[in-house]
Every structure is written in C-alpha cells, then in structure tokens.
Image (tube, grey):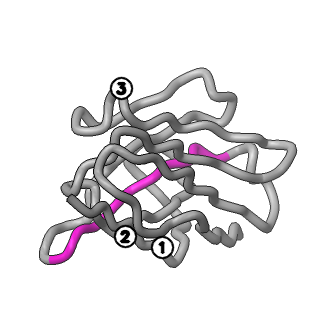
Amino acid sequence: QVQLEESGGGLVQQGGSLRLSCAASGRSFSNYLMGWFRQAPGKEREFVAAMSWNSGNIRYADSVKGRFTISRDNAKNSVYLQMSSLKPEDTAVYYCAAGSSWTLYNYWGQGTQVTVSS
C-alpha cells in the first residue's frame, strides 16, 4: 500500500513557474513508476509525465515537453514536477500516481490545484 500527498499548487501568472511535490508513505516506493496527471474542469484526466523507478526512463505529454520536468528522490520517497512557462491551459487539478506499469497506476493522491492566470 502506498499513500500519496501532493503539495505546491497555487495561483501563478502566465509565464510563471511552480514546483509540485508528492510525498509517499508506505512500503516499496522505489519499486513503483511515478507519474503526474491533471484534470481540467469539464475534461477527462490526462497524462502529464512519468518516470521509471530508477529515473532511467521518462515520458512527457507533448503539451508539456520542454516546459515541465519530472524528478524523484527515492531516499525521500518523493516525486516532483517542475513547471515553467505556464499557460492558462495548464490550469487543472494535478494528481500524483504510483504505478506498476506505464499503463496501470495503482495509487493516487488527492490532487493539488494549479491555476494560471492570463
């Protein structure tokens, strides 16, 4: 069992930056692939970024490539999402997730709101 808690969301102006953090508790955090997803009002949840357990394999959604960076610290049971050059369309609730594969995420956090003003 893994519990996840996101933090770092907030209100930022277009072009600004935010860093989201996700703290994990429970066992075997380092065994899991970690990902970030987001859900905007009226839209389905979408993939943002994910990283393998050893940080050797990283994937990004096309919409965030070059602007967002995912990282993890297994010693601190944490994963991060550095977001730069933010756009109003990045406004969403951002969720951290732990997965056993690139397509199966077993555990989810409660989410943190990110709002980008124009």
Q: Earlier in the sequence, mark 3 or mark 1?
A: 3
Mark 2 crowd level (few <14, some 14–19, many ≥20, 10 Å Cα):
some
Residue 88 drawn at (x, y percent): 22, 57
Residue 18 drawn at (x, y percent): 50, 52
Residue 57 drawn at (x, y percent): 53, 24
Q: Earlier in the sequence, mark 1 or mark 2?
A: 2
* Element carrying mark 2: strand
User: In this figure, which residue is indicated by the disc labeled 1?
Assistant: 111
What whole-number distance in Å separates the C-alpha atoms at marks 3 and 1?
23 Å
Q: Amino acid at mark 3?
A: Gly
Are the residues flagged by discs 1 and 2 in contact, CB closer than 8 Å? yes
**Image point 45% across, 64% down: which residue?**
95
* Element carrying mark 1: loop
Are the residues flagged by discs 3 and 1 in contact, CB closer than 8 Å? no
Look at the image and say whether residue 94 sits in the magenta stretch.
no
What whole-number distance in Å separates the C-alpha atoms at marks 1 and 2?
6 Å
Q: Say which of 89 and 78 sits in front.
A: 89
- The residues colored magenta run 32-41
Q: Say which of 102 and 117 sits in front.
A: 117
User: In this figure, which residue is indicated by the disc labeled 2?
Assistant: 93
Q: Say which of 13 and 100 sits in front.
A: 13
Q: Amino acid at mark 1?
A: Gly
* Element carrying mark 3: loop
Q: Amino acid at mark 2?
A: Val
- Main SS class of the magenta portion in the image: strand
Q: Residue furthest top?
A: 56
What whole-number distance in Å separates the C-alpha atoms at marks 2 and 3?
20 Å
Q: Is residue 10 above or below residue 37?
A: below
User: In this figure, which residue is indicated by the disc labeled 3?
Assistant: 66
